[in-house]
Image: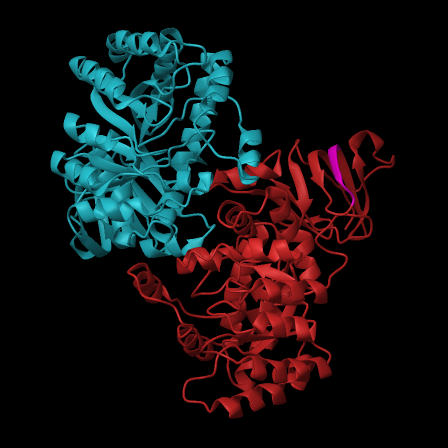
Chain colours: A cyan, B red
């Protein structure tokens, strides 16, 4: 819980500037001091981590994952590389495998993925349900997320995504009513957020509005899968309801982006999805930036459209494919993502922030973007404890 | 030198089919047997490597690298992300740093990069000079490549690239004459190949022809940097001269691609360059495939336009960005790349081939493409010896 990190070549605090030849002190799990190494307060530290001149950044915040699932979708992936298009139907494949798996197995699989994410520097992670698609199975997935949270050092933010897709054979009005009826119990089982996949072929803007209004009544924060497959006005809905985040946004319009900015909706970019789907949808980051939307990054870790636990890879693609600057990308992966989860004490290393940080395997954060295919993280620290 | 690999879930030989539940025997550094595990010849093996159900592929062949250099080009990289264009001028920055470095340092730096490549599964690697740009310095770089070859288990193919760029302040006719005059000594110092950066702003087709014809007289094989920055007809020259490879090819025309195919010129794709340069030049792979050109993959490892030692990352981008199928990409990274180096006994695991192989960290090669940001290689074996 108490740790002094010394020999930091370059320290990005995100809220209190960049320090060179710096040090940082964590006490009782929180940042107590950060600054030039020569000004390090006296007193024998309990534990010392030597950064060896490396660059240190806040622990990455992964603002959008579907970490709890079973099964593989290799055939769908190989087919897509052979030129077939993706319409979201593949989710049902994962639903079958997930329903068939024991809760114990689901937690084990998710914990393995979390362990990989931790090694890639993730210290806070949003985790959605959505592969249960019945009250019973969705609530079981929330139990799995809660168990996961107890098994990983990563801070987990659980999201109820009963409205991921209409289950095969179900009546959609009945299913929407079922999703809404389950919300209070989802909140009791630990959900902090409610999300809806609002897109062509999935849930309509009206259906999403009904669900999210009900979620707000139960005290849940609101998130929205918006404008991924086609423009539907979902980003406008996110602005209307004041959602904490609208995610994907490949087809967002400039007007809806401005509405998002006015309403304080954070735009969550998922560049690994664009790469996985070969969609070449790279332009929306510029639309959002132009409108003044606060940007966040996430992996969207899921078995169909983004098998990825690596925030450094998301950062790399955000720069090289979406056109973010190095500074914008690191901010989106830390402060921006924390902002999308309304976590004021995460995603930065100012005084009082969570003692979550990453010692990069580089002396400058730009090298993480430039060095392709290489490991990015030397050490991950959570709450002042080196964990990976 | 003698090794039995057992428990191979899936064995891609590239020349003798795909075996399931397979085994492979290396004797005296060469593949002696490969097939279903139940048919494994009797006899006590000297050393056993258990693959644990993983997929095994031939060691990767990196057909194009500039591994020997000193210095970093971080500022240029950050500037490019801010929207500036690349015209090859950055090479001169590396030339200055490389000339200033001792040969010992150059070999150390290259050996570190080779070690990283080995961990990523590379077992054969082409290495170019080109950051010396004077007879003295270019020959010193060939010495460094030879020393590197003695220090890494990777099989190194040395290439003389005196014609990388016209040195600052030099008269271009004088410099071309100097490059040509140096070729016989380059051959004596171990160069097996000669390459020219033939492009707009670098060397013309006529200059490249002069240099390559001289190289052929000295017994060197021919390679060519072609059509990267602008269409100049360099790919047509590669066909005319029967070069072993033409590399980059972002601007190749269908007609020149057909000429390459007829002449047996292998097309070396460098997808990490397209990503690094943010050029969105992804379409040429389809042009080359349509023309029937044999495809190879490479990292182009260099400090300015592709800081990358990872062939699995090149494979991933070749599929997800360039549109190769998983099968095409793995073939290009093994058999195709070996073909571009005219190495009949590498890039495959048929009887008699070099005992160079990679135990992937996956049960199927498609997972290496699908799993973004993840480590791809469990174990690298060179000549029957597990080395990484």
- Residue B58, compared with residue B255, is above or below; it is above
Q: Which residues are magenta?
A: B16-21
Residue at screen point 42% across, 66% down? B304
Residue A267, x across and y down, in percent = 24, 37
Residue B332, x across and y down, in percent = 63, 52
Q: Which sits in the foreground, A228 or A114?
A: A228
- Residue B187, compared with residue B239, is above or below; it is below
Quadrant housing residue B153: bottom right
| Name of the residue lying farthest toward the front | B255
- Residue B1, compared with residue B218, is above or below; it is above
Q: Which sits in the foreground, A334 or A3?
A: A334
Residue at screen point 84% across, 37% down? B44
Using residue B23 as the reference point, say whether residue B92 is left or right of it. left
Residue B293, x across and y down, in percent = 66, 58
**Residue B223 seen in render:** no
For the stretch drawn in magenta, what is the main secondary structure? Answer: strand
Using residue A91 as the reference point, say whether residue B368 is left or right of it. right
Quadrant housing residue A252: top left
Quadrant housing residue A333: top left
Residue B17 highlighted magenta (yes or no): yes
Residue at screen point 25% across, 10% down? A188
Residue at screen point 61% across, 39% down? B365
Q: Which sits in the foreground, B248 or B93?
A: B248
């Amino acid at each position: 819980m108490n740790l002094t990190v010394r020999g930091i070549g370059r320290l990005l605090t995100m809220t209190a500037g960049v320090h060179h030849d710096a040090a940082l002190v964590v006490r009782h799990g929180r940042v107590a001091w950060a600054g030039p190494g020569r000004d390090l307060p006296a007193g024998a530290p309990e534990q010392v981590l030597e950064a060896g001149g490396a660059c240190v950044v806040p622990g990455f915040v992964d603002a959008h994952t579907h970490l709890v699932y079973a099964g593989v979708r290799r055939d769908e992936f190989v087919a897509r590389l052979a030129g077939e298009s993706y319409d979201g139907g593949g989710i049902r494949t994962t639903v079958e495998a997930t329903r068939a798996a024991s809760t114990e197995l689901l937690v084990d699989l998710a914990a393995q993925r979390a362990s990989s994410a931790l090694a890639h520097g993730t210290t806070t992670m949003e985790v959605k349900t959505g592969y249960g698609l019945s009250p019973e199975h969705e609530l079981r997935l929330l139990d799995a997320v809660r168990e996961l949270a107890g098994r990983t050092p990563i801070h987990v933010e659980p999201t109820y995504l009963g409205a991921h897709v209409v289950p095969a054979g179900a009546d959609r009005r009945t299913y929407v009513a079922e999703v809404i009826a389950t919300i209070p119990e989802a909140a009791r089982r630990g959900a902090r957020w409610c999300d809806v996949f609002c897109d062509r072929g999935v849930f309509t803007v009206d259906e999403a509005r009904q669900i999210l209004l009900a979620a707000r009544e139960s005290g849940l924060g609101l998130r929205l899968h918006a404008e991924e497959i086609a423009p539907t006005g979902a980003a406008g809905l996110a602005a209307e309801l004041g959602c904490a985040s609208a995610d994907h946004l490949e087809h967002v319009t400039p007007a809806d982006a401005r509405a998002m900015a006015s309403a304080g909706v954070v735009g969550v970019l998922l560049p690994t999805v664009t790469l996985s789907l070969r969609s070449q949808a790279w332009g929306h980051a510029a639309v959002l930036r132009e409108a003044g939307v606060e940007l966040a990054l996430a992996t969207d870790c899921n078995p169909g459209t983004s098998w990825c636990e690596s925030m450094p890879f998301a950062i790399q693609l955000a720069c090289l494919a979406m056109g973010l600057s190095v500074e914008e990308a690191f901010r989106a992966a830390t402060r921006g993502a924390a902002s999308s989860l309304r976590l004021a004490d995460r995603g930065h290393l100012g005084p009082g922030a969570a003692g979550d940080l990453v010692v990069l395997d580089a002396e400058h954060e730009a090298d993480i973007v430039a060095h392709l295919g290489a490991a990015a993280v030397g050490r991950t620290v959570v709450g002042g404890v080196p964990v990976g």
